[in-house]
């Protein structure tokens, strides 16, 4: 997990470096409203630009996916 | 007598020489003990350091009762301990103050147990929606993963209570169909759980379990 947001009010961000072998797992919980709001904005921005995973693909080609596959 | 306490033989000799006298000058002590000037000075400094002798402005020295000295050393040691306690309490208060400032908005958790517990608690506290960034499930094919085991994850338990879960997987999505087995399995299980039809995933629809990926 790289980020989890709960009801747009609290966020948890694990330290990616702490996932490495020999490191103690660390995570930061953010409740400060302005920071959480920024993370929600980030999530929504990425969500809006995301594409459904292939297993949900129903046969109708997604233009963005096609474009990305051509690059 | 004093050597078992760590006092040197020369210092003990000087202390014994001082015992029957109210005070004595250095030449007298040197004569009584047979110590040279340097040896005597070192012995007197040693006695002064531990509180067994003190010197006057006139250059005379007098010994102090051993029991009184020990009591004084105890008092001094207790005072040092008390100062240490005060310092420790001040440090603790400082750390608590730092902790309270963390509680206002940002808290760092250390250790897998603490992180896992907080993650579970956060998911349990959700009332409407969970949003997440995560690595694609197929990156490491989790051997032995079943729908039952997935149901035990905090996100799934939240979904059991009607919480919407939106997840964006990490860039690097590999369309290789031979490696998306776990994705299909997880997606199908989630869709079944949320009552959605894979043919109509209904992104963002309330009560559904949409899963997105970034290409």
Image (cartoon, rainbow, N blue to C red):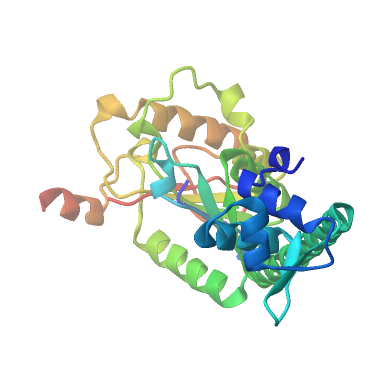
- Describe residue B175's horizontal placement relative to residue B184 as left or right: left
As drawn, the residue found furthest toward the bottom would be B57
* Residue B64 in sight from this viewpoint: yes
Give above or below for A45 relative to B36. Answer: below
Of the pair B76 and B207, the residue shown nearer to us: B76
Give above or below for B67 relative to B188. Answer: below
Q: Position of residue B49 (x, y in %)?
A: 67, 62
- Describe residue A3's horizontal placement relative to residue B111 as left or right: left
As drawn, the residue found furthest toward the top would be B144
> To which quarter of the image does residue B97 belong?
bottom right
* Residue A11 in sight from this viewpoint: no
**Residue at point 70%, 81% (across, down):** B58
**Residue at point 28%, 43% (across, down):** B173
- Describe residue B54's horizontal placement relative to residue A24 as left or right: right
The number of numbered discs placed on residues in the rendered structure image is 0
Of the pair B119 and B41, the residue shown nearer to us: B41
Of the pair B70 and B169, the residue shown nearer to us: B70
> To which quarter of the image does residue B84 belong?
bottom right
Give above or below for B127 relative to B201. Answer: below
**Residue at point 45%, 50% (across, down):** A2
**Residue at point 26%, 24% (across, down):** B178
- Describe residue A27's horizontal placement relative to residue B63 as left or right: left
Q: Position of residue B130 (x, y in %)?
A: 59, 53
Q: Position of residue B185 (x, y in %)?
A: 45, 27
């Amino acid at each position: 997990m790289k980020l989890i947001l709960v009801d747009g009010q609290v966020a948890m961000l694990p330290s990616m470096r702490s996932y490495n072998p020999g490191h103690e797992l660390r995570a930061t919980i953010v409740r400060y409203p302005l920071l959480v709001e920024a993370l929600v904005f980030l999530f929504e921005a990425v969500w809006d630009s995301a594409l459904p995973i292939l297993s949900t693909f129903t046969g109708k080609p997604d233009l963005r996916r096609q474009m990305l596959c051509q690059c | 007598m004093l050597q078992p306490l760590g006092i040197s033989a020369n210092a003990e000799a000087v202390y014994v020489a001082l015992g029957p006298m109210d005070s004595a000058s250095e030449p007298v002590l040197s004569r009584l003990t047979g110590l040279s000037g340097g040896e005597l000075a070192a012995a007197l400094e040693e006695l002064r350091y531990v509180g067994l002798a003190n010197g006057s402005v006139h250059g005379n020295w007098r010994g102090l009762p051993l029991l009184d000295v020990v009591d004084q050393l105890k008092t001094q040691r207790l005072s040092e301990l008390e100062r240490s306690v005060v310092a420790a309490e001040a440090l603790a208060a400082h750390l608590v103050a730092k902790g309270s400032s963390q509680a206002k908005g940002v808290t760092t958790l250390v250790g897998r147990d603490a992180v896992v517990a907080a993650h579970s608690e956060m998911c349990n506290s959700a009332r409407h929606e969970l949003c997440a960034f995560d690595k694609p499930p197929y990156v490491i094919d989790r051997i032995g993963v079943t729908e039952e085991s997935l149901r035990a994850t905090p996100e799934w338990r939240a979904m059991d209570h009607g919480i919407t879960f939106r997840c964006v997987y990490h860039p690097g999505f590999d369309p290789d169909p031979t490696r998306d087995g776990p994705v299909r399995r997880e997606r199908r299980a989630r869709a079944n759980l949320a009552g959605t039809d894979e043919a109509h995933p209904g992104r963002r629809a309330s009560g559904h379990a949409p899963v997105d990926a970034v290409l």
